[in-house]
Structure formats: C-alpha cells, structure tokens
Image (cartoon, rainbow, N blue to C red):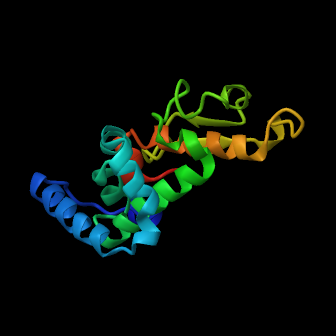
Amino acid sequence: DRDQHGLLDFVETKEMCAEGIAKMDEALMALSIASKSEYLQALFTVPKIVARESDHLRFLRSTNFDATLAAEKLALYWNTRVKLFEEKAFLPMSIEGALSDDIDTLRKGSIRLLEDDQHRRSVVYMERGLISPVRHSGKSWLRCVFYIFHAGLERKHMQTEGVV
C-alpha cells in the first residue's frame, strides 16, 4: 500500500541524518550564487529563523535524502518566500510575523490543514471561492497557502508521508 502512494520504507538514523546534512551542505555550496541568493541573505540576516524554519532535515526527508534535490528545494523555498512576502520574508513565519497583513484572508478558511488520512498523510483543504477578489489579493491567498504548507511541514510525518 505504501508503494502505491510512492512512499519509501526506510528507518531514519542519526548517521543517515548527519551524512545527509553534510552532503546537502556540499550541494548548497555547488549551487550558483544567483539560485541561492535569497537563502544566503536569510542565512546572513536571520540565521536563527533559517535554522528553525528551514531545517535541512525537512528538505532531506521530503526528497528521500537526495541531498542535491534537497539543496535545490531549500534555495527554492527561500526564493519563493522572498517573492511572496517581500520585506516580511525574514520575519518569523507566523501570524504575528510574516503573515500579519494576511490574517483576514487566513480566517476565511479557504485553505486549512485538516486531520491526517488513513495513510498518515496530511490533508490540505483549499476552496478558492471563499476569497473575495475585492477584499483579498491573490498574493495574500498565495502567502496563506505558503504558510499552511510551512506550518504543516512542522509535522515530521508530512515531510515523509506527503500531503493530499
């Protein structure tokens, strides 16, 4: 059943994590400056937020420990975060921080993180029709989508089991 859903069975070990992090650091070094500029800016500006909110293991788990792909996804994460949140990208990813201007959009309930399904996959519910184009910008809705997935990824099993 797990194979049907594209899930791999492996036991994560401390050694696997340490090796994955080291390989991911090497892969990050190999990326072009242009592709990782927002990540580097975040690392320089808010290293504690980078460590807390974009931990290497989140990206390694979601790529079955493919360090090169994980490095690319980490850079893409920060590129997307900066593009969506602009000057607020380097604030904590919270309602009080980066999402402070999007509380009304989030409260509409057009995107929610629900209980897991029977395969332990996180369930994200989206209903774009609940957003009024007069009261909510498309960019605000996209920031809320980013936030919900970011918050969901704090669940370790969402990093490995995926989302529906």
Q: Is residue 73 above or below residue 141?
A: below
Q: Is 131 or 135 nearer to us in this picture?
A: 135
- Can residue 53 be seen in the rendering of this structure? yes
Nearest the eye: 37 or 148: 37
- Image coordinates of residue 26 in percent, x first then y, are 22, 70
Coordinates of residue 48 in the picture (x, y in percent): 31, 38
Q: In the depicted view, which residue is nearer to us: 47 or 5?
A: 47
Can the viewer see residue 1?
no
Write the residue at 31% across / 43% down. Answer: 47
The residue shown at (55%, 39%) is 88
Residue 157, given in percent of the width and then of the height, sits at 36, 45
Image position of 69 (left or right of 109): left
Q: Is residue 98 left or right of residue 9?
A: right
Q: Position of residue 112 (x, y in %)?
A: 62, 35
Residue at 36 percent of width and 73 percent of height: 31
Q: Residue furthest right?
A: 134
Quarter occupied by residue 66: bottom left
Kindly identify the residue that appears in the image at 40 percent across and 59 percent down: 74
Q: Within the image, what quadrant is residue 27 found in?
A: bottom left
Q: Quadrant of the N terminus?
A: bottom left
Residue furthest to the left? 15
